[in-house]
C-alpha cells in the first residue's frame, strides 16, 4: 500500500456497524488511522480525552445518545479545531443550513460513493498538514 501524502487521524461516528466498517476499511486502505464510535456521546468522549489528537471527524446525523449536531457543537466546545465531515442520509434543507451555520467542512450524502468521501478527506487533509 502506498502511504498518502497526508495521513490523517480520523474519528468516525455512526450507529450503523456496517457503515463504520466500510468507512474504517476504506480510510485505512487510503493510509489513514481510523477510530470508530457507535454513537455521538462516545465520539465526543474520545475527543474530550485529547482534543488535538484527531485531524478529522466524520459523523452521521441521527445517532443515539447524541446526534451529529451535538457532536459538532460539543467537539468544538471541547477544543477540537480539526475538520468535520457530515456523512448522513436524507438531510432536510433546514438540517443542511444548520450544519452550514455550525461551519462543518463538508456534507456528503449517504449512500455516497466512497470515492467522494475519500476525495474530500484527501482535499481537507492537504490543508491540515
Image: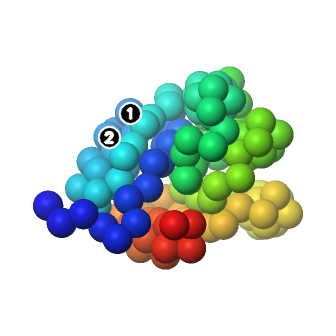
The residue beneath circle 1 is: 17
**Which circle marks residue 21 in the picture?**
2
The answer for how far apart the CA atoms under marks 2 and 1 are is 6 Å
Name the residue nearer the viewer: 122 or 92. 122
Left or right position of 87 against 23: right
Q: Quadrant of residue 42?
A: top right
Q: Residues within 10 Å of mark 1 (few under 14, many from 20)?
A: few
Name the residue nearer the viewer: 77 or 43. 77
Q: Residue at x 32, y 40 (%)?
A: 21
Q: Is residue 37 visible?
A: yes
Q: Residues within 10 Å of mark 2 (few under 14, many from 20)?
A: some
Q: Quadrant of residue 27?
A: bottom left
Residue 121 drawn at (x, y percent): 47, 66
Residue 122 drawn at (x, y percent): 43, 70
Q: Is 120 located above or below residue 28 in the figure?
A: below
**Which circle marks residue 93 in the picture?**
none
Q: Residue at x 30, y 67 (%)?
A: 4
Residue 119 drawn at (x, y percent): 41, 73
Left or right position of 113 against 93: left
Q: Furthest residue to the left?
A: 1
Give the mark count.
2
Q: Furthest residue to the front?
A: 129
Residue 48 drawn at (x, y percent): 68, 29
Left or right position of 51 against 121: right
Looking at the rendered image, the quarter that the N terminus falls into is bottom left
Q: Is the image coloured rainbow, by chain, by secondary structure, or in one colour? A: rainbow
Disc 2 to disc 1: CB gap under 8 Å: yes
| Dot 2: element | helix
| Dot 1: element | helix
Q: Residue at x 44, y 35 (%)?
A: 36
Q: Is residue 113 visible?
A: no
Amino acid at each position: 500500500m502506498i502511504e498518502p501524502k497526508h495521513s490523517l487521524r480520523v474519528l468516525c461516528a455512526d450507529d450503523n456497524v456496517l457503515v463504520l466498517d466500510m468507512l474504517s476499511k476504506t480510510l485505512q486502505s487510503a493510509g489513514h488511522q481510523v477510530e470508530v464510535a457507535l454513537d455521538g456521546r462516545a465520539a465526543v468522549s474520545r475527543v474530550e480525552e485529547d482534543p488535538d489528537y484527531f485531524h478529522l471527524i466524520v459523523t452521521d446525523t441521527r445517532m443515539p445518545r447524541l446526534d451529529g449536531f451535538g457532536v459538532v457543537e460539543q467537539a468544538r466546545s471541547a477544543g477540537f479545531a480539526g475538520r468535520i465531515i457530515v456523512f448522513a442520509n436524507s438531510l432536510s434543507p433546514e438540517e443542511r443550513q444548520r450544519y452550514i451555520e455550525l461551519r462543518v467542512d463538508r456534507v456528503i450524502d449517504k449512500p455516497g460513493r466512497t470515492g467522494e468521501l475519500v476525495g474530500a478527506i484527501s482535499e481537507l487533509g492537504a490543508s491540515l498538514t
